[in-house]
Image (cartoon, grey):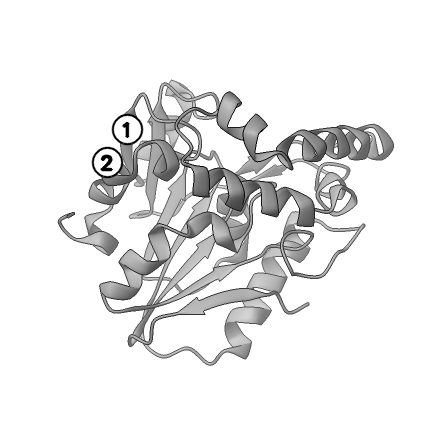
């Protein structure tokens, strides 16, 4: 399936941005213009069941990754592609195995636990969506959000399809590995990335970089620290 994408900038190289669960292409609203100003064509995609992309109640990581590949191929991009994937989006990015010059995984171990009960997980996501649709609730639970961050993420919640995302956890476990030279940027401490995970990434030749006291959505809580942690894409910031 072809995915909806926010397409900004007109550079010879492309920055592909994949959001996390319950996010949307808009989640990169502060990141995209910085990359466009640095000469990128920026493609921030809505993953299946998110934003304006199609729904699929039988979605798997493999199908989500195939949709990303199909969408990239449909755009006939010029020049090298650099990519950032956050959390769930990082796992999809790893599964896509595109020909990428720079790959950045944000606070993710590239794994997804399967075997979930479809009905109960869908109901849980429905409940989570209901809370996240309220910008005031988001700001009270995430004090590092700006007002615009909260509006963007509340809007993403209203467009989120619980059945599509719940389906990903109803099949087999997904465990992927980074390639040599790929980059992991993680919060320190992280609720998602353990010390063992960091060692495993490093042993596989990945570059592991930490941002102290950051939230899971690292660029929301520590924007300048995040951009500084990836000079391969952002250069010296500001």
Q: Nearer the viewer, residue 202 or 220?
A: 220
Name the residue at the right extreme: 119
**Residue found at x 67% / y 29%:** 131
Quarter assignment of residue 53: bottom right
Q: Nearer the viewer, residue 47 or 206?
A: 47
Which mark, residue 43? none
In this rendering, position of residue 153 left or right of residue 161:
left
Label 2 crowding class (10 Å Cα cut-off): few <14, some 14-19, many 20+?
some
Q: Compared with residue 143, is residue 146 higher up or lower down, i.e. above or below?
A: below
Quarter assignment of residue 143: top left
Give SS at disc 2: helix
- Whether the residues at callouts 1 and 2 have beta carbons within 8 Å, the answer is yes
Residue occupied by mark 2: 225
**Residue found at x 44% / y 30%:** 216
Residue occupied by mark 1: 211
In this rendering, position of residue 216 left or right of residue 3:
left
Where residue 141 appears, as percent x and y from the top left, is 52, 22
Give SS at disc 1: strand
Where residue 214 appears, as percent x and y from the top left, is 34, 26
| Image quadrant in which the N terminus is located | bottom right
Where residue 82 appears, as percent x and y from the top left, is 34, 60
**Residue found at x 83% / y 28%:** 120
Of badges 1 and 2, nearer the viewer stands 2
Label 1 crowding class (10 Å Cα cut-off): few <14, some 14-19, many 20+?
some
């Amino acid at each position: 399936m072809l995915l909806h994408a926010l397409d900004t900038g007109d550079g010879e190289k492309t920055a592909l941005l994949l959001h996390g669960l319950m996010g949307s292409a808009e989640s990169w609203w502060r990141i995209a213009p910085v990359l466009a100003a640095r000469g990128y064509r920026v493609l921030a995609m809505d993953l299946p069941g998110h934003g304006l992309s199609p729904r699929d109640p039988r979605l798997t990581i493999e199908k989500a990754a195939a949709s990303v590949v199909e969408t990239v191929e449909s755009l006939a991009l010029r020049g090298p592609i650099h990519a950032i994937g956050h959390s769930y989006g990082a796992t999809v990015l790893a599964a896509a195995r595109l020909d990428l010059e720079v790959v950045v995984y944000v606070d993710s171990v590239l794994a997804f636990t399967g075997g979930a009960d479809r009905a109960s997980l869908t109901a849980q996501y429905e409940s989570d969506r209901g809370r996240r649709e309220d910008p005031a609730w988001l700001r009270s639970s995430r004090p590092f959000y700006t007002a615009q961050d909260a509006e963007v993420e509340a809007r993403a919640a209203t467009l989120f399809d619980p059945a599509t995302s719940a389906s990903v956890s109803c099949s087999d476990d997904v465990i992927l590995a980074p390639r040599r030279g790929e980059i992991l940027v993680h919060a320190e401490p992280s609720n998602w990335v353990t010390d063992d995970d960091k060692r495993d990434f490093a042993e596989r030749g990945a570059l592991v970089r930490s941002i102290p006291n950051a939230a899971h959505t690292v660029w929301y809580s520590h924007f300048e620290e995040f951009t500084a942690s990836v000079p391969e894409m952002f250069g010296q910031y500001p």
